[in-house]
Amino acid sequence: MLKGKNIPKERTIDQTFALLAEGYNYLPNRTYRENSNIVQTRLLGQKIICISGEEAARAFYDEGRFIRKTAIPKRIQKALFGEHGVQVLDDEEHKHRKGMFMSIMTHESLERLEKITKREWRAAAGNWTKEEEIVLLEEAKVTLCRIACEWAGVPLYEDETRERARQLFDLVDSIGGVGPRYQRGRKARKQTEKWVADLIRQVRDGRLSPAEDTALSIIANHVQLDGELLEPDVAAVEVINIIRPTVAIAYFIVFGALALHEHPSVRERLREEDGTYSKMVVQEIRRYYPFAPMLGARVRADFLWEGYAFKKGTLVLLDLYGTNHHPDLWEKPDEFNPDRFKNWKKSPFDFIPQGGGDYDKGHRCAGEWATVKVMQVFMELLAKELEYEVCDQDLSYSMVRIPTYPESGFRMRVLNLKPKAISQFAEDIQK
Ligand code: HEM
């Protein structure tokens, strides 16, 4: 039997209530208290090993050590992810399916996304000037839903946009929810899968012809290793794996607006500097603000890591939020400072808001470049093209709710679009 060093352990029987009470800080609180990047706990009656930091992420993304198949609880699959999607695949089956996703993320496709994003944000901002005030979270959901569907080749009628945006957002918002919030996610899962599975059938029998490089076309025509097309409901799960997280960028958009409000000097520099600075701002928003808290995987076969024994079948949680705030990796981790990304060594394992490791071989987020692109366009628009005031409101956010955002949704008054933005918008719609 494999024998290793003692892993620091929680003394209480079950920690599920502590997790619910401490949210994003649950894992960092324990690794900090034990001064250790590894701690053992019990959640929902099972033994769990929690790990944090760059070396922990490197181990977590070592395919020889972990599998994903049975790591994601059914309750999360039935709302957030759907069943039989890329998240629960391993080995060759995963690589083949992931190849399908990465073939959507070409340079040309991301350029198309950038163009759509610029046009849609500017069009939305033009409408915001006509309102007394807007709630940015609500507007971002709807605008991102338009962007996501156009980019993915998913037809979206104007009168259904708000409803679809809400459904896609509810899927994500269900993650840490219990009761009505979780039930909304379950209902949205049924509604969105029915909608998209029907689109898949329409593509396959020729009633709908999305452009070849769109997600809808690529996924509808994807051939699996066994030579078969995906079942329509699994294909729907994968198309939703593109449009749902694009709508979820709304959480980061609100935090981006909050960052500029709290750090006027960052806003000033964004106004004056080129894309290199806006990229650093976006990276810092994704590092600093909480979104995906942790990831789970199961030990494939017994192994030793840094002298600790990991036994086959054990559930291991990698702390994403804690790694992005780890004091060994980040100087003054609890300060918002985009300049830290000037000399970032670009490790695939220290900055992991959307997972780590390799895009093609591992489970790292397929949409990370798309996320950065969409956020960069928004942050530049906000700083350079909009004149706005932030309404009086409570902008604090909970560290217990997962996912979190300022409860007010960020209320703002958009006074004007700068003349440059208006002429740019006129150009955009002629393209
Ligand atoms: C809101 C911003 C986003 C966040 C915080 C986020 C976060 C994540 C995380 C934490 C993972 C899991 C990585 C792992 O299991 O190791 C993931 C996977 C994934 N994400 Fe994202 N994501 C975002 C945006 C996107 C976008 C815009 C897309 C698509 C356009 C996307 C598509 C995917 C896919 C397909 C996977 C599964 C990859 C796999 O299992 O191999 N995500 N994302």
Image (cartoon, helix red, strand yellow):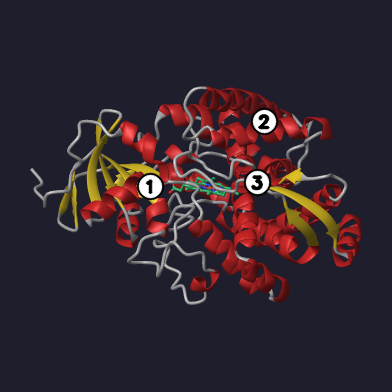
* Mark identifier at residue 196: 2
Q: Residues within 10 Å of mark 2 (few under 14, many from 20)?
A: many
Query: Label 2 vs label 3: CA separation?
Result: 38 Å
**Measured Cα–Cα span from mark 1 to mark 3:** 25 Å
Q: Are marks 2 and 3 in contact (CB under 8 Å)?
A: no
Disc 3: which residue: 393
Secondary structure category for the residue under label 2: helix
Answer whether labels 1 and 2 touch (C-beta < 8 Å).
no
**Residue 29 in picture, x, y percent from top left:** 31, 49
From the viewer's side, name the closer residue of 57 and 338.
338
Residue closest to the eye, 126 or 76: 126
Q: Which residue is mark 1?
A: 25
In the image, the residue with mark 2 has its CB under 8 Å from the nearest atom of ligand 1: no
Q: Measuring 59% from the left and 58% from the top, which residue is drawn there?
A: 369
Image point 30% across, 61% down: which residue?
55
The kind of secondary structure element at disc 3 is loop
The numbered mark at residue 398 is none
Identify whether 89 is placed above or below 122: above
Q: Residue at x 33, y 31 (%)?
A: 17
**Residue 5 in picture, x, y percent from top left:** 11, 52
Amino acid beneath label 2: Val
- What amino acid does circle 1 point to? Asn
Answer with mark 1 or mark 2, whichever residue precedes in sequence: 1
If the image is split into quadrants, where does the C terminus sit? bottom right
Does residue 241 sit above or below 332 in this rendering? above
In the image: residue 169, left or right of residue 54: right
Q: Secondary structure at mark 1?
A: helix
**Amino acid beneath label 3:** Gln
* Labels 1 and 3: the sequence-earlier one: 1
Query: Label 1 to label 2, Cα distance in Å?
Result: 36 Å
| Residue 380 image-quadrant placement | bottom right
